[in-house]
Amino acid sequence: MGEPTRTARRRTPLRSTCAQPHACPHPVRMQVLGRVPYLEGLSREQLEAIDARLVALSWAEGDPLYRAGEPAEHLFVLASGRVKVTRSTADGAQVITDLLVPGDLFGTVSTLGEPEHPETAEALTTVCALRMDAATFRAVLAEHPGVALRVLDDVAARLAAARAGAVRAAGGTVEARVAGVLLRLADRLGQDRHDGGTLLQVPLSRADLAAMSGSTPESVSRVVSRWRREGVVDAGRRWIAVVDRDRLAALAG
């Protein structure tokens, strides 16, 4: 038989890299849970008890972990890979609202006031994540009041960040908005390069950068091409690097 199509492959979690479904290595799971801000301060034994209730799953690049409008039944802790979170605008465009790295907790459950997922989470690379159902999440909150308080603080912070992001997207030049996006990505996902620059080895397209900056792919391409000529950034297929951070900061205002 020939190689299955990409569409067919996406129906089944990918059995490779850090874990197979239900088989993520225990040291990886514990390391990742220890990085979740909600669970800060919990003992090894407490993390072990939480870990015993979680399910490990893996997805291939391009697979949705969940889609907007689906019932909000699970939270996820990213164990490896990168995930982008998108939301549809009123005119049907897709806007990236977040890029996730290992240790991030994402998704939602009705306990947090969301009966349905308001956004879509898609694997940017091969992804392994630990899944927690609503009943487990409620049990963790009941057993650990400190975790419950951090969840409340985080929900409030996310709402404030969403409002601030909407204000940023509504104003400023294309250059300023793209510069701001690259700086935020560099702080969150960047890796140091030998030339002093910061590498963003994340498969983001010009369309993705456009969505994050409230612009168009054509405008972003023109801006990035000019910055490459001027030595502000470097870029290739599926990667971009910040070379002159000071210049970007000045452009971002």
Image (cartoon, grey):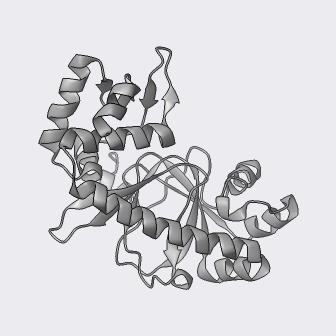
Q: Is residue 160 in sight in this rendering? A: yes
Q: Where is residue 140 in the image (x, y as percent from the top left)?
A: 72, 76
On screen, residue 159 above or below 130: below
Q: Position of residue 222 (x, y in %)?
A: 14, 32
Q: Is residue 239 in sight in this rendering? A: no
Q: Is residue 71 left or right of residue 139?
A: left
Q: In this view, does 53 lie to the left or right of 60?
A: right
Q: Where is residue 241 in the image (x, y as percent from the top left)?
A: 38, 27
Task: Give whichever of 11, 94 is nearer the camera.
Answer: 94
Which residue is rendered at x = 31% and y = 65% of the image? 87
Which residue is rendered at x = 26% and y = 49% of the image? 213
On screen, residue 170 above or below 207: below
Which quarter of the figure is the C terminus placed in?
Answer: top left
Q: In this view, does 125 lie to the left or right of 17?
A: left
Q: Position of residue 132 (x, y in %)?
A: 62, 71
Quadrant of the rendered structure where residue 218 is?
top left
Quadrant of the rendered structure where residue 86 is?
bottom left
On screen, residue 249 above or below 122: above
